[in-house]
């Protein structure tokens, strides 16, 4: 039987600075918007923050040693912008750069290919206060300055780069669901901030070509391929609307440099189309990526939404099954239940075939390589009496998704790597530490026993074998 995974396939795992590092005010780091936002009562689950997180900042050597023991080929992490620029711009914090230097060297010494994410949501608080972060065009230059600093410092050793992590999900939570900073519900601000992020994305990709000409860069998109709830023409139309508004709005701008025309015209008539200035279109065309980073967790199903129908809805952030509420745009689409797929305790559809379908859609529309930069299952894990974590459900989830990657590759999808989310357990932005994703358990269950010690879960040994056999089994 032919194994479609090439010899140097990038088997990996991913993380993000705010969710693992801790050391939030050490060695000259400035606060990020998240350090401040989590202090507002009721914003996150039990007010949990990443101020200590899993203390990766101090334990990175131990964590990399575990990665090496597992045989990981690649590791995706993000750089904390306020660790490098405590004020967001201007003075560079050398100690911050030093930390990532050490981490990158440690990875390379163990034969692990680093994948560096430039922005994974922890924008410097100083820029939020100065001009409202992503709501001002001023951020484009500041972000570019920060990225160039990283290109110059790490471009000789880091080959794979992710520009923006999940711009779509981040802005949806920030401006529609009121769950990420600045925490509002305002469609106009949502589309304007997205436009500024598109420009910033194109700008830093354009700079990348100059500073890291041999490297590869792309954004990571939170991709939730969708289905129609039924074959009724109204639901089919709603599904197509949703695809345009929730996927192609981002993917087209990234990969083609232009907004998709159908949603653009709709938004224009609703007074919601983003404001274009001179030079914007030219800049967007310069942002073409080398690959599409896909963060895949689930599919979503859509149905017809009457004009006076559902608007913003509500997300399950508790792990209480069934607490999701439908969301949508009146007149266009709304989310619906899919009875054909199982759901996690957070109501996320478990749908490995959806990953294959999504990758095929990206391939046929853009014909670009795909890098799965996140895929995983968040669940309550239990430290058993035998001192182990038997996460068979996670193994089943990952195994079925990797199988569909194989199928997708045989369908003609060019897949360059697969990163599970996540390597160690880490902070879930809104769900605290109870929603776990890692191969390595981090002990912070009981208040009195938060020693943060690392314990390998059953899935650790399983993934070790997947890598050893290059996905053969
Ligand atoms: C993605 C983010 C990650 C991570 C993951 C799991 O959206 O890029 O940072 O958090 O989802 O999400 P959650 O922690 O909400 O379950």
Image (cartoon, rainbow, N blue to C red):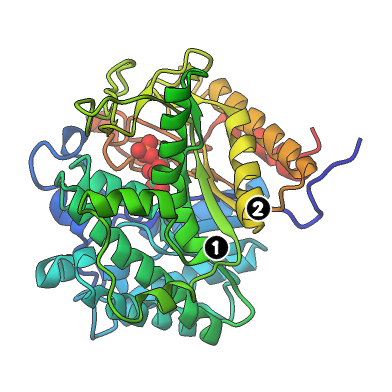
Indicate the quadrant where residue 237 lies: top left
Residue occupying the point 13% across, 71% down:
131
Foreground residue, 72 or 231?
231
Nearer the observer: mark 2 or 1; the answer is 2
- Residue bearing the label numbered 2: 417
Q: Position of residue 332 (x, y in %)?
A: 33, 34
Look at the numbered discs 2 and 1 and tell me whether their residues touch, using CB distance below 8 Å. Answer: yes
Q: Residues within 10 Å of mark 1 (few under 14, many from 20)?
A: many
Q: Which residue is mark 1?
A: 115
- Asked if 190 appears above or below 429 in the picture, the reply is below
Task: Answer with the quadrant where ligand 1 appears in the image.
Answer: top left
Question: Residue placed at 35% from the left, 56% from the top?
Answer: 21
Position of 294 with respect to 344 (left or right) is: right
Q: Is mark 1 within 8 Å of ligand 1?
A: no
Callout 1 secondary element: strand
Give the Cα separation between the discs numbered 2 and 1. Answer: 11 Å
Q: How far from the left and from the top, in percent, is residue 301?
A: 44, 26
Residue at x-position 15% and y-position 40%: 43
The percent position of residue 128, horizontal first and vertical second, equals: 15, 65
Residue at 33% across, 40% down: 428
Residue 339 higher or lower than 202, as above or below: above
């Amino acid at each position: 039987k032919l194994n479609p995974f090439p010899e140097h396939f990038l088997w990996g795992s991913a993380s993000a600075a705010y969710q693992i590092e801790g050391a939030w005010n050490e060695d000259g780091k400035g606060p990020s918007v998240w350090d401040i936002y989590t202090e507002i009562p009721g914003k996150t689950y039990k007010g949990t923050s990443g101020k200590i997180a899993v203390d990766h900042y101090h334990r990175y050597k131990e964590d990399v040693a575990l990665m090496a023991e597992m045989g990981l080929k690649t590791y995706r992490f993000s750089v904390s912008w306020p660790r490098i620029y405590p004020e967001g711009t201007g003075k560079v914090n050398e100690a911050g750069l030093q930390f990532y230097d050490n981490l990158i060297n440690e990875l390379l010494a163990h034969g692990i290919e680093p994948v560096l994410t430039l922005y994974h949501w922890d924008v410097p608080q100083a820029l939020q206060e100065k001009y409202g972060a992503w709501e001002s065009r001023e951020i484009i230059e500041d972000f570019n300055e920060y990225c160039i600093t990283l290109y110059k410092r790490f471009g000789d050793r880091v080959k794979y780069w992710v520009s923006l992590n999940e711009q779509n999900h981040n802005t949806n939570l920030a401006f529609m669901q009121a769950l990420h900073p600045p925490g509002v519900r305002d469609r106009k601000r949502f589309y304007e901030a997205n436009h500024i992020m598109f420009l910033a994305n194109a700008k830093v990709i354009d700079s990348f070509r100059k500073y890291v000409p041999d490297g590869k860069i792309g954004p990571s998109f939170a991709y939730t391929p969708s289905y129609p709830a039924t074959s009724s023409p109204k639901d089919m139309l709603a599904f197509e609307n949703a695809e345009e508004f929730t996927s192609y709005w981002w993917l087209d701008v990234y990969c083609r440099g232009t907004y998709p025309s159908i949603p653009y015209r709709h938004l224009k008539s609703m007074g919601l189309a983003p404001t274009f200035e001179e030079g914007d279109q030219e800049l967007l065309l310069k942002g073409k990526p080398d690959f599409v980073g896909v963060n895949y967790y689930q599919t979503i199903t859509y149905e017809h939404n009457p004009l006076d129908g559902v608007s913003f809805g509500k997300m399950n952030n508790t792990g209480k099954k069934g607490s999701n509420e439908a969301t949508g745009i009146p007149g266009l689409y709304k989310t619906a239940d899919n009875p054909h797929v199982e759901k996690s305790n957070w109501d996320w559809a478990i749908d490995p075939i959806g990953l294959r379908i999504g990758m095929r859609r990206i391939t046929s529309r853009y014909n670009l390589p795909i890098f799965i930069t996140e895929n995983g299952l968040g669940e309550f894990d239990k430290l058993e009496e035998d001192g182990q974590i038997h996460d068979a459900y996670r193994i089943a989830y990952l195994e079925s998704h990797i199988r569909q990657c194989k199928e997708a590759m045989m369908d003609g999808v060019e897949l360059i790597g697969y990163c599970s989310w996540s390597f160690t357990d880490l902070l879930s932005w809104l769900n605290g530490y109870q929603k776990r994703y890692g191969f390595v358990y981090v002990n912070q269950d009981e208040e009195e026993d938060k020693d943060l010690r690392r314990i390998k879960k059953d899935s650790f040994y399983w993934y070790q074998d997947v890598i050893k056999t290059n996905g053969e089994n």
